[in-house]
Image (cartoon, helix red, strand yellow):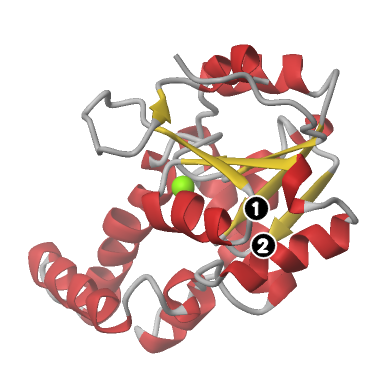
């Protein structure tokens, strides 16, 4: 049983894998990009997948470039327009039902923000159906110039919202970006883990579990 938290004013949410089903962006990076690479360069899909995956690995997810579609379009010589691609695949986007329920409830009593490593075009696309619940949104690469791998990024968000980290709770699905880093910034952090597989870190199973904690 987790202790109830007092004095929280702002609830901060990660987006991919937390509000929005992570399979949407997974599909973009690991199926769509290799497919276009295969067509553009005349290689079979499995070869394309291998090349693309290897290039992603070289950059790694602690480098801001990893999150910027235009960087990869250029690196792979793909003639793509991000907004057009997102629009074409819009039916694949799914907001977790428990996220909608939690947002609806929490927005009555707290200020809600989104903090993501995705670029602003992707974030806005992903949140458009639930945008009304959010007070402010932060795309770390687009708005803050780097991903949230250092506590400073979360401290900058505190400055920009004019809310002390002590009055903020951050919720997300990534043990490093959503737990370790905000915790270092003095922000209470909770992981959401819908799989139920234990990670050793305390977590909730669905976002509506927050309602009892706050
Ligand atoms: Mg996430």
* In the depicted structure, whether residue 39 falls above or below residue 168: below
* Residue position marked by numbered label 1 in the rendering: 115
- Residue drawn 14% across the image and 63% down it: 45
Farthest-out residue, right: 162
Check residue 171 in the rendering and tell me which mark sits there, or answer none.
none
Q: Residues within 10 Å of mark 2 (few under 14, many from 20)?
A: many
Which image quadrant: the N terminus? Answer: top left
Quarter of the image for residue 207 reads top right
- Residue drawn 25% across the image and 38% down it: 199
Q: Residues within 10 Å of mark 1 (few under 14, many from 20)?
A: many
Residue 137 relative to residue 26: left or right: right
* In the depicted structure, whether residue 21 falls above or below residue 186: above
Give whichever of 62, 9 is nearer the camera.
Answer: 9
Image location of residue 50, percent across then percent down? 12, 71
Check contact, mark 2 vs mark 1: CB within 8 A: yes
- Residue drawn 84% across the image and 64% down it: 159
Quarter of the image for residue 157 reads bottom right
* Residue position marked by numbered label 2 in the rendering: 154
Image location of residue 209, percent across then percent down? 53, 16
Image location of residue 44, percent across then percent down? 10, 68
Quarter of the image for residue 95 reads top right
For marks 2 and 1, the one nearer the N-term is 1
Numbered disc 2: secondary structure? helix
Residues at marks 2 and 1, CA–CA distance in whole angstroms: 9 Å
* In the depicted structure, whether residue 133 falls above or below residue 142: above
Numbered disc 1: secondary structure? strand
Which image quadrant: the C terminus? Answer: top right
Give whichever of 22, 121 is nearer the camera.
Answer: 22
Image location of residue 154, percent across then percent down? 67, 62
- Residue drawn 65% across the image and 72% down it: 152
Residue 22 relative to residue 34: left or right: right
Q: Is mark 2 within 8 Å of ligand 1?
A: no
């Amino acid at each position: 049983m987790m202790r109830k938290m007092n004095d929280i004013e702002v609830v901060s949410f990660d987006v991919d894998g937390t509000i929005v089903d992570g399979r949407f962006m997974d599909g973009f990076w690991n199926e769509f990009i290799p497919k276009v690479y295969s067509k553009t360069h005349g290689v079979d899909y499995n070869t394309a997948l291998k090349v693309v995956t290897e290039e992603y690995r070289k950059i790694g997810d602690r480098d801001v470039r990893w999150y910027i579609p235009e960087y990869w379009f250029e690196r792979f010589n793909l003639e793509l327009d991000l907004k057009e691609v997102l629009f074409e695949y819009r039916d694949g986007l799914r907001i977790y039902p428990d996220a909608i329920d939690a947002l609806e409830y929490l927005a009555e009593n707290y200020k809600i923000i989104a903090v993501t490593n995705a670029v602003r075009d992707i974030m806005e696309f992903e949140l458009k159906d639930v945008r009304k619940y959010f007070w402010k949104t932060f795309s770390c690469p687009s708005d803050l110039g780097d991903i949230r791998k250092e506590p400073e990024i979360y401290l900058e968000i505190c400055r920009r919202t004019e809310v002390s980290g002590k009055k903020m709770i951050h919720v997300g699905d990534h043990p490093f970006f959503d737990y370790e880093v905000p915790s270092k910034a003095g922000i209470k952090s909770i992981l959401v883990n819908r799989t139920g597989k234990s990670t050793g870190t305390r977590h909730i199973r669905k976002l509506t579990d927050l309602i009892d904690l706050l």
